[in-house]
Image: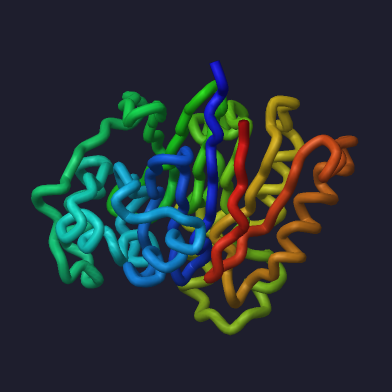
């Protein structure tokens, strides 16, 4: 039997909006929808993907940069929106939700898998300051994708799902020096650097270097800050940490710093 091709695209990844596509040649799912609906449609169309191919939207938490278009996708396009009950409550309370969710609501329990076509999906707890917060582990055709987009630190649970992944989408939000010297007010700097805020390049790099598994093939660094990071800096920090442990980027693992507001290329895995 031919193994299927699994396709991954980051439509946007950053503090202004996040949306990822994971699918096959005939259908797919979105993880978060924090960019405009027109942008989602246009970006998917450029890859030959119509909205009618989207079977579900999985939401990680209720911050605006992750949910901006879920009302439109769920209620107007009839796509089921999956998340925990607490996240759903938070979504409908959010100022950015002009279209409240009702008919499209689907509940997930953390650590309980659901199946959508060929995808087995498990939501798991991550530490962040949304109403409730999850990462997603998605398995299909013997491949494991783990999405950890906003998390303040790596808990044992988060670490377990990072180590499981063949394909890892993980946050490298800020450079510590840039955040410290940057224009943000003190409370915001403290929130970002706090245990329920975001991961720095160094923290992500260190964890990946110390917990590298040979089954990990791709690392995409996501949710980079516009003001407190540069893609090159995030990339270099992780590359150097891996190199210190004898892990060579491009040979032992592929590393990509995702762009904030423009789609990545389409990655296809057999």
- The answer to whether residue 264 is above or below residue 79 is below
The total number of labels drawn is 0
The quarter of the rendered structure image containing the C terminus is top right
Residue 220 drawn at (x, y percent): 63, 49
Can you say whether 27 is above or below 157 in the image? below
Q: Residue furthest bottom?
A: 183
Rendered residue at 51%/35% (across/down): 158
> Relative to 71, is 128 on the left or the right?
right
Q: Residue furthest left?
A: 103
Residue 214 or residue 151, whichever sits in front: 214
The residue shown at (43%, 38%) is 136
The spot of residue 126 in percent (x, y) is 44, 42
Q: Nearer the viewer, residue 106 or 61?
A: 106
Q: Nearer the viewer, residue 141 or 108?
A: 141
* Corner quadrant of residue 160: top right
Q: Residue at x 20, y 56 (%)?
A: 77
> From the image, which quarter does the N terminus lie in?
top right
Farthest-out residue, top: 1
Q: Position of residue 251 (x, y in %)?
A: 85, 39
Residue 38 in the image: above or below residue 21: below
Q: Residue at x 19, y 40 (%)?
A: 106
Q: Is residue 4 left or right of residue 110?
A: right
- Figure colour scheme: rainbow
Q: Quadrant of residue 216?
A: top right
State the image coordinates of residue 198 (x, y, percent, origin top left): 53, 57
């Amino acid at each position: 039997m031919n193994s299927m091709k699994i396709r991954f695209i980051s439509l946007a990844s950053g503090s202004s909006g996040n949306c990822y596509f994971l699918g096959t040649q005939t259908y797919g799912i979105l993880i978060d929808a924090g960019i405009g609906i027109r942008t989602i449609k246009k970006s998917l169309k450029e890859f030959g993907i119509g909205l009618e191919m989207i079977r579900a939207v999985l939401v990680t938490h209720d911050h605006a940069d992750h949910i901006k278009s879920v009302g439109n996708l769920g209620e107007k396009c009839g796509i089921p929106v999956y998340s925990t009950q607490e996240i759903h409550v938070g979504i409908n309370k959010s100022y950015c939700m002009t279209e409240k969710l009702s008919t499209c609501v689907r509940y997930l329990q953390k650590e309980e898998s659901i199946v959508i076509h060929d995808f087995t999906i498990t939501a798991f707890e991550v530490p962040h300051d949304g109403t409730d917060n999850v990462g997603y582990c998605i398995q299909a055709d013997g491949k494991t994708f783990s999405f950890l987009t906003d998390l303040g630190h790596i808990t044992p649970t988060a670490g377990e799902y990072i180590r499981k992944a063949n394909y890892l989408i993980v946050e490298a939000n800020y450079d510590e020096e840039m955040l410290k010297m940057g224009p943000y007010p003190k409370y915001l700097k403290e929130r970002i650097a706090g245990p329920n805020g975001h991961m720095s390049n160094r923290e992500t790099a260190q964890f990946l270097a110390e917990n590298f598994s040979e089954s990990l093939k791709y690392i995409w660094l996501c949710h980079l800050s516009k003001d407190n990071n540069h893609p090159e800096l995030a990339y270099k920090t992780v590359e150097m940490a891996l190199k210190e442990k004898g892990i060579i980027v491009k040979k032992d693992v592929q590393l990509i710093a995702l762009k904030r507001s423009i789609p990545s290329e389409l990655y296809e895995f057999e």
